Image (cartoon, rainbow, N blue to C red):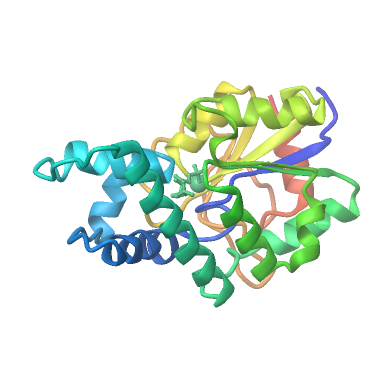
Amino acid sequence: MAELKALIFDVDGTLADTEKDGHRIAFNMAFEQAGLDWHWDEALYGELLAVTGGKERIKYYLEKFNTRFSKPAGFDEFVKGLHAAKTVFYTQLMAQGRIPLRSGVARLINEARQAGLRLAIATTTTPENVTALLTNTLGAESLSWFEVIAAGDIVPKKKPAPDIFIWALAQMKLKPEEAIAFEDSRNGILSSKAAGLKTIITINGYTAQDDFSQAELVLDQMGEANQVFRVLKGEVGHRSYLDLGLVRKVHQQG
Ligand code: XBP
Ligand code: MG
């Protein structure tokens, strides 16, 4: 078994619960600003999460849930404009410190840094959103902790395609067996597994019912010493939260 050299993190849903109270709100603010009567409530947004990428999600909404909207000339530019406005609103929400990191995330990242492991991010979200989340949670210096931040349109095919993880691995000159992925969703695990990565899942409200049969470990959260995790799949021995020792154990298995 190869030695574990790097941890590769998804962002939305994994590092922080950004979808319901972050992205969704920012989309709605952009729609309102543009004078559109579209509103994505929590339930509809859950359905829209089937498609990753904000621009792609807007198009999916119009194809499947709002077919009566007549597309303006220059439709792609219209969607791009809406999405750019959404990104501005989203980064403003992050600057207000609205969304904390999920339990255990900061601790695990620090453990990994202390152990000399390499860190990367592989996400479909826009790069500015990653910068905003990290800066407003771990501090601006945390951006330099991640050797690679693979995000947004850097690869044309977003998750569930494996491209973003493959791109991150190539940048780091690592084989998939030398890293492990952290994900929260079905699209995420389809992507990480197709890139050949062992994967640890932390579920959230939108992804609790997803099929994670391919995952090595499925938890409700990473947890802390005083915040015990619930194990939905996998072997954790005596542990009650996800520490680096357990990550290494999962990496070594099978
Ligand atoms: C994240 C996404 C993104 C965000 C919105 O998926 O699907 O589309 O919801 O980001 P994952 P943008 O966690 O699997 O990477 O609007 O910036 O695209
Ligand atoms: Mg995610």
* Percent x, y of residue 247: 73, 44
Q: Is residue 65 left or right of residue 163?
A: left
Image quarter where the N terminus lies is: top right
The vertical placement of 7 against 242, above or below, is: above
Q: In this view, does 90 lie to the left or right of 4?
A: left
Q: Which of 10 and 155 is in front in this view?
A: 155
Find the residue positioned furthest to the front.
73
Q: Is residue 240 left or right of residue 110?
A: left
Q: Is residue 34 left or right of residue 88?
A: left
Q: Which of 110 and 164 is in front in this view?
A: 164
Q: Nearer the viewer, residue 109 or 1?
A: 109
Residue 243 visible (yes or no): yes
Residue 49 visible (yes or no): no
* Percent x, y of residue 43: 24, 56
The residue positioned 49% from the left and 32% from the top of the image is 158
The vertical placement of 57 against 168, above or below, is: below
The residue positioned 74% from the left and 57% from the top of the image is 108
Q: Which of 47 and 199 is in front in this view?
A: 47
Q: Residue 142, located in which quarter of the rendered image? A: bottom right
Find the residue positioned furthest to the bottom.
96
Q: How many numbered discs sit on the rendered protein?
A: 0
* Percent x, y of residue 237: 68, 47
* Percent x, y of residue 34: 28, 61
The residue positioned 61% from the left and 65% from the top of the image is 103
Image quarter where the C terminus lies is: top right
